[in-house]
Amino acid sequence: MIGVYLMHFKCTFYLGKMHFFGKGVPVDYDTALQLFERAASSGDVRVEVEATKATVELQALLRRAADLRAEGIQIQSRGGTYDEDRVGEEPPYILRRKAFLGEL
C-alpha cells in the first residue's frame, strides 16, 4: 500500500487488480473500485486508460449484481486467494466470473 500513499499510480492500478481478482489479498470490489478511480486520475495516459476501463467494467459488474439481487436472485461472492500451484484447476475468480455470466 505504500505505492498508493506515495501516489505511484501504476502500483495503485495493480493493487486494484489484486483486490479485484483476489491475488494475494481477499477479493474486495469496493477497494478495487477506489484504487482504480484513484489510478484513473494519475496524469499518466497509459495508466489512466487502463484504470478508467477497469473502473467502468467494475461499475457495470456491480450494477448488474445489484439488479440481480433486486430481482431476488441470490449472488454469492467468495473472497480468498488462489494458489498458483494448483495445476489443472481454474482459479476461483474465473469460476466466479463464469457463474456470474451463466457460463457454468
Image: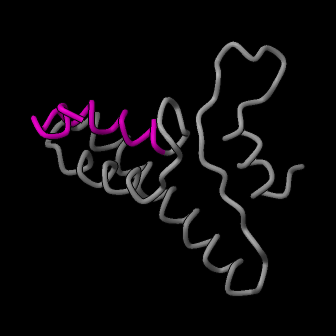
In the picture, measured across the screen, residue 58 lies left or right of residue 48, that is right
In the picture, measured across the screen, residue 59 lies left or right of residue 16, that is right
Image location (x, y in percent) of residue 80: 60, 41
Q: Is residue 18 magenta?
A: yes
Residue at the image position 18 percent from the left and 36 percent from the top: 44
In the picture, measured across the screen, residue 80 lies left or right of residue 11, that is right
Q: Is residue 94 magenta?
A: no
Image location (x, y in percent) of residue 40: 26, 49
Residue at the image position 28 percent from the left and 34 percent from the top: 46
Give the camera-side residue of 35 and 92.
92
Q: Please determine whether, in this image, residue 94 is positioned above or below residue 101.
A: above
Query: Which quarter shows the N terminus?
Result: top left
Among the 4 quarters of the image, the one containing residue 62: bottom right
Q: Residue furthest bottom?
A: 71
Q: Please determine whether, in this image, residue 8 is positioned above or below residue 58.
A: above
What is the tally of numbered marks visible in this picture? 0
Q: Residue furthest left?
A: 6
Residue at the image position 51 percent from the left and 56 percent from the top: 57
Image location (x, y in percent) of residue 13: 33, 38
Q: Residue furthest right?
A: 104
Residue at the image position 68 percent from the left and 86 percent from the top: 70
In the picture, measured across the screen, residue 56 lies left or right of residue 98, that is left
The majority secondary structure of the magenta stretch comes to helix
Q: Please determine whether, in this image, residue 14 is positioned above or below residue 40.
A: above
Image location (x, y in percent) of residue 103: 86, 51
Colour setting: one colour
Among the 4 quarters of the image, the one containing residue 87: top right
Read off the magenta span: 1-19
